[in-house]
Each structure stands twice: as structure tokens, then as C-alpha cells.
Image (spheres, helix red, strand yellow):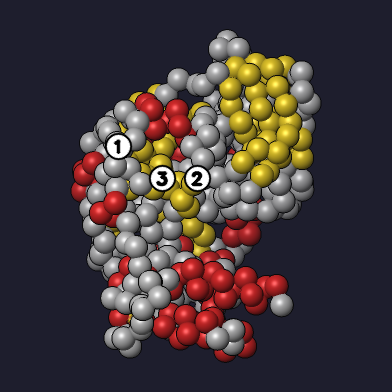
Amino acid sequence: MRSFFGGIHPYDGKALSRNSAIEELAAPKQVVIPLSMHIGAPAKPGVSAGDSVCVGSVIGEAATGVAGISAPVHSSVSGTVAAVEERLHPNGRRIVSVVIDNDFNDTLDAEVVPQTIDEHDYSTDIIRILYKAGVVGMGGATFPAHYKLASGLNRADTLIINGAECEPYITSDHRVLLEDADAVLRGIRHLRRALNLDKAILAVEANKADAIALLKTKLEGTSDIEIRVLKTRYPQGGEKQLIQAVTGRQVPSGKLPADVNCVVFNVYTAWSLNQAIETGLPVISRVVTVSGPGVAYPKNLRVKIGTPVREVLDAAGGLKADARKVLLGGPMMGNAIYDLDVPVIKGTNSIVALAPEQIHHSADTNSVCIRCGRCIGVCPMRLQPVYLYAYERKNKLDELKKLHIADCMECGSCAYICPGRLHLVQAIRSGKAKINNR
Ligand code: SF4
Ligand code: SF4
């Protein structure tokens, strides 16, 4: 098993939910669907208050055509548009969103039909289907998948499917691999054929032994998908770390995976592509792990996009009395939210509630760096967090650039290991913002 430089071994908490089969959460009375759930230009409103919509109807048009970085947005329920207005987004900002009252009829849009693929123009058709279905990086990165696939055409010699799921507590991809492996494998084969490659590599961390055994059984006698077992280490699922672990190639500073002839898609992105082909359904729901010591009954749920986080937590028994912090995403890279009524969006792979013991209150005014160098040893990007911290405090922005602050992926490994409990990631974020604003 290969791995990457640096990294840490945090408590993974996955035992709380890894054996919980995916349950379907009933759609809420009202969904709030932001028009920005992806990297790139927000979608443009395609409906107005009073309009009727069906499940899968386009409610936000991609701001760009298929050649640009944007994605359409679809209704996850049938019903009536109550408003198109700014609502609180999980990122803490107010974003134009479509509010839909559910009529509970689940009427499908006429456009939701299985897709046919032209054997002679496979790549173009898969790009079209990804675009039409609004598929984005479903591991949380939310980069439009059609654009990523197009950027790898005639360049990529390696297709990697990211099944690492290295963030603590999250088990949604693990469950999808266990419960719907055939659909994931069909999605991977469509991506492989679109890229005109003989083989795809499905990379899974060693802590998912049951999924690895199942996949190996299903792939017996085939050679077009290889299961690559990776060491369990955070942040194994980072795109650049995964590429290094699988191929030994290092993506240079400021470059993209395609620059080292690789394309990486998440397991659930492959599953979503397969769904779009076989049923015509765009991304209107996703599997969400609801877990952490602050949740009464951790589980995995399939949730309609636009469902309030509060209702998802309620379906898992609600928050325990001592829950102190709710995160969308895992404890290493997730965002803390202050309002439980924000909606589940395409990139919400988990809702994690922490109890006081998991929250390190740190960096009081007496905290100091003891120059132990541990932050440098764990940084997967080979940066020097201790100096990034010191230069940010002193507003030495040129020095920050020389130390490649832009390469920091904000994985949190340095802050996790730091005995001084310094707010390293916050300082790095602040440093990046200062550079961008000067
Ligand atoms: S947060 Fe940035 S500086 Fe810290 S370990 Fe991760 S990549 Fe390195
Ligand atoms: S880990 Fe913390 S205390 Fe150690 S060198 Fe880095 S910033 Fe300083």
C-alpha cells in the first residue's frame, strides 16, 4: 500500500455509522434550494414565484454553456414555487435560492427519461449528461463534473475514483459502495469509456475491508477497474494526495491533476452519473452521514436537496443535550453552522455534531509556538505552517507568497498536531484573504 507525504491519524469515529444502512428520509413540506451549490458561476433563476415545478425540473439555468464552469439546479420535489429570494446558505452568506412548497405528489418532469449514449461520440454524450444532470464533485468539492471530464479528454492517462473517504465520522461513500456497488461500477465504466482509457483505478482506504472484499468479488474476471487499497491516513482523499499515493506523481504547485495526466472523480459522482443515464434523474438528493458524539442515533440517510439540516438531525434522534457544535462536512475540513435551518446541498456528505470533549478551545493569549516542527512534518503539501502563521501575524504578505501559502488545502493537519494549539488554519485563511485583497 502506497501513501503520500505527511498526514495524521485522527480518531475516525466511523464505527458510529458504518453499519447503518442508508434510509430514505421523507421530503419536507418546503425545500430551499440555493442556486449556488457548485464551484463557478451561480445558476440563473429559471422559475418565478407561483410557478409549478416537478421532480427534476430545471429551476436554475447554468450561467455558462456546457463549455463553462457552472451547473444547472433542479427541483427535488413537485409543487409550487413560493419565492425566489436570498436565503442563508451553509457557507454563512445569503444566496439567491428557490423556495418550493411540496405538494407530495412526486410528479416527475417530462424531461426525466433514461439517456441514450451515441457509441460513436461517447465523450460528448457523457459530458452532456453530466452537465444536464447538474453533477458536481459529490465528495464535497462541488467542481462541475462535465468540465472536469472535458479538461481530461486527450490528456488523462489515469482515471482515479476517490473512495478514500478519509474524514472522520463520514461513511456515506462507504455505504454506497456496500449497498449499490454495481451502480458505482457502471458509472466508473462510463467515465472510463468517455476518457478512452482501458482501465480505471478505484482507490479505497484499508479501513473499508468489507467494501473492498465486495468490490473484488464483483470485479473477478475483469480488468477494466482495479481496486487500489490505500493506507488509512488523513488527508488521503485530497486530490493531490490521492494522485501521489496511486501513481507516485506529484502535482506541482499551482497546477491541476490534468497537468500530470490524471482525472479524479468521487465514488458518489460516478453513482450520480449512472443514475442520470439510467433514469434521467439529475442531482436532487444525496446520501448524508449524520453522526458524531452529539447525535442521538448516528445513521446514513438519503436526503432531498433543500431539506433543512434540522429535519435531518431530527431523523437521527436529534441533538444530544451536550452537543456543542454542528458541522457540515467532517471535523477536519467541515464548516460550522450557526443556524440549523440551512439546507442540505449537493456537497453535503455529512452533518457532524460534536460534544465539548471534541472541541479544543485553544490559543488563549498565552499560547506560543514551541518550535517543535511537528506541523511541518505532517503537512501533506510540504509547507511550513509555523512560518505561515508567524508571517501572517506580522502582515508579511510577500514572505507568505514565497512560502506558497496558496498551496495550502486547509486540511487542518497542522492545527490538529500543534501542541501550542495555535490557530494555524485560521491564520493561513486570513493570510490568503489579505493577499487577495491587497
Ligand atoms: S492546513 Fe495547510 S499548512 Fe496546515 S497541514 Fe494542511 S495543507 Fe499544510
Ligand atoms: S506544531 Fe505548533 S508549536 Fe510546533 S512548530 Fe508548529 S506551530 Fe509551533
Instruction: Decide which of 38, 214 is in the foreground and name it.
Output: 38
Kind of residue sitting beneath label 1: Ala
Q: Position of residue 226 (x, y in %)?
A: 34, 54
- Residue 328 visible? The answer is yes
Residue 338: mark in rendering: 2
Q: Is residue 378 above or below residue 293?
A: below
Quick one: label 3, few (<14), some, or many (20+) residues within 10 Å? many
Query: Residue at the location (50% across, 73% down)?
Result: 427
* First in residue order: circle 3 vs circle 2: 3
Kindly indicate the quadrant of the structure image that contains residue 185. Answer: top left
Q: Quadrant of the N terminus?
A: bottom left
Mark 2 in CB contact with mark 1 (< 8 angstroms)? no
Q: Which residue is mark 1?
A: 321
User: Of label 1 and label 3, which has the lower sequence position?
Assistant: 1
Q: Vertical placement of 111 versus 135: above or below?
A: above
Residue 326, numbered circle:
3
| Three-letter code for the amino acid on which mark 2 is drawn | Tyr
Asked whether residue 255 appears in the rendered view, the answer is: no
SS category of the residue bearing label 3: strand
